[in-house]
């Protein structure tokens, strides 16, 4: 999912090969975008502003990247996408993408080990680079907050910090096998983990450090200028796929993983501040799949493998006490149909969901 920078649109990619876009103010469906022949793997609104022209990018398991142009005044999309097919061999998938802070560059990662960089300086996207330094799939990529640097993470056990220098992308290597001299280092990988892999990458809010997660269950904090290892953070017991920096405090990072732990870290001191274990009664723990921090830094929300939404924050949770353990809208499981343009209708009433009366919350037994 992605939200436009003006907070006017919500876009969601699906395994049914489509992208659906809604108006955030009215919940009216604005578009069903069909340009991929396989699942959507990443979706990004571009921060680039050019009059009222905007872009939404999507990558797919079909090895393509699509650039969808839309108008910020009318919220209407153009006829079809600008499309790049990047299949260096059969079966290649594009799996991750990230825009630079101003939207002038987009970097993508792929299963063919290649990083592709697209440039928007001429008004339309053009591919300017193919970087073939990694030895395995590149499945995490993130531009910095304030510059043209980006970090890529690969299954080859390395991450790289890239910077454009005299029209050439140069990189600093971050090796997950690096150790801290004179300090405690975690024991070597267990036998079941035969190869180190980077699972996620992130920047702190001021871009001074890069944080990597690896399948040996450690997080590593690196100096983003020199590539030197600063801290090794230990506390997770399964792989971590969520690294979320605080929106304005460069010291704070949230991490979450398949072990059910959500941890708040102090990057300056390299220590854990708080942690939460997502225990589900009678079912063990729920793996945490995603996590996002609110713009004011007061809350963060997470989703888990059992379909739960977890909300963390300061103060009292008493206003949530009356909420049922499992809560749905009464229309959630009603059958749907699609019209000729792939828009969704309620099967019973033949109406679009946004035109129906507002649904009401019910508990697991259907009681309001």
Image (cartoon, helix red, strand yellow):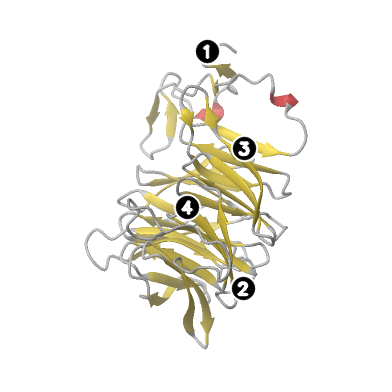
Of circles 1 and 3, which is in front? Answer: 1
Mark pair 2, 4: CA separation:
29 Å
Which of the marked residues, 3 or 2, is nearer the chain's N terminus? 3
User: Mark 2, residues whose alpha carbon is within 10 Å: few (<14), some, or many (≥20)?
Assistant: few
Q: Are marks 3 and 2 in contact (CB under 8 Å)?
A: no
The numbered disc on residue 26 is 3
Q: Quadrant of the C terminus?
A: top right
The image quadrant that residue 115 belongs to is: bottom left
Task: Tell me: 137 left or right of 57.
Answer: left
Mark pair 3, 4: CA separation:
42 Å
- Asked if residue 351 can be seen in this view, the reply is yes
The residue indicated by pointer 4 is 217
Looking at the image, which residue sits at the far bottom? 166
Please state the horizontal and vertical placement of residue 128, each as a whole percent of the image.
43, 78
Looking at the image, which residue sits at the far right? 315
Mark pair 1, 4: CA separation:
41 Å
The residue indicated by pointer 2 is 147
The residue indicated by pointer 1 is 366
SS type, badge 4? loop
Of circles 2 and 4, which is in front? Answer: 4
Which of the marked residues, 3 or 4, is nearer the chain's N terminus? 3
């Amino acid at each position: 999912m992605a939200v436009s920078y003006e907070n006017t649109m919500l876009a969601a990619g699906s395994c049914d090969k489509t992208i659906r876009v809604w108006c955030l103010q009215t919940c009216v469906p604005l578009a069903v975008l069909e340009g991929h022949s396989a699942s959507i793997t990443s979706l990004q609104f571009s921060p680039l502003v050019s009059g009222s022209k905007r872009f939404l990018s999507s990558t797919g398991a079909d090895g393509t990247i699509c650039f969808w142009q839309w108008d910020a005044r009318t919220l209407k999309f153009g006829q079809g996408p600008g499309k790049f097919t990047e299949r260096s061999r059969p079966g290649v998938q594009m799996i991750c993408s990230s825009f630079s802070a101003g939207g002038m560059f987009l970097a993508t990662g792929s299963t063919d080990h290649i990083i592709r960089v697209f440039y928007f300086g001429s008004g339309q996207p053009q591919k300017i680079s193919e970087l073939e330094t990694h030895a395995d799939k590149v499945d995490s990529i993130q531009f910095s907050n304030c510059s043209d640097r980006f970090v890529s993470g690969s299954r080859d056990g390395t991450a790289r910090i890239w910077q454009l220098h005299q029209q050439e992308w140069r990189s600093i290597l971050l090796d997950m096998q690096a150790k801290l001299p004179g300090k405690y280092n975690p024991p070597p990988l267990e036998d079941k983990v035969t190869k180190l892999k980077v699972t996620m990458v992130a920047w702190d809010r001021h871009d001074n450090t890069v944080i990597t997660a690896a399948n040996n269950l450690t997080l590593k904090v690196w100096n983003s200028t020199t590539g030197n290892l600063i801290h090794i953070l230990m506390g997770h017991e399964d792989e971590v796929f969520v690294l979320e920096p605080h929106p304005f405090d460069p010291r704070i990072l949230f991490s979450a993983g398949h072990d059910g732990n959500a941890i708040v870290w102090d990057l300056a001191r390299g220590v854990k501040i708080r942690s939460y274990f997502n225990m589900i009664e009678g079912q063990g723990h729920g793996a945490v799949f995603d996590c996002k921090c609110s713009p004011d830094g007061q809350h963060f929300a997470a989703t888990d493998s059992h379909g739960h939404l977890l909300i963390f924050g300061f103060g009292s949770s008493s206003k949530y006490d009356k909420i049922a353990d499992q809560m749905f809208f009464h229309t959630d499981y009603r059958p749907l149909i699609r019209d000729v343009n792939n828009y969704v209708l309620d099967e019973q009433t033949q109406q679009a969901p946004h035109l129906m009366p507002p649904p009401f919350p019910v508990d697991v037994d259907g009681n309001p």
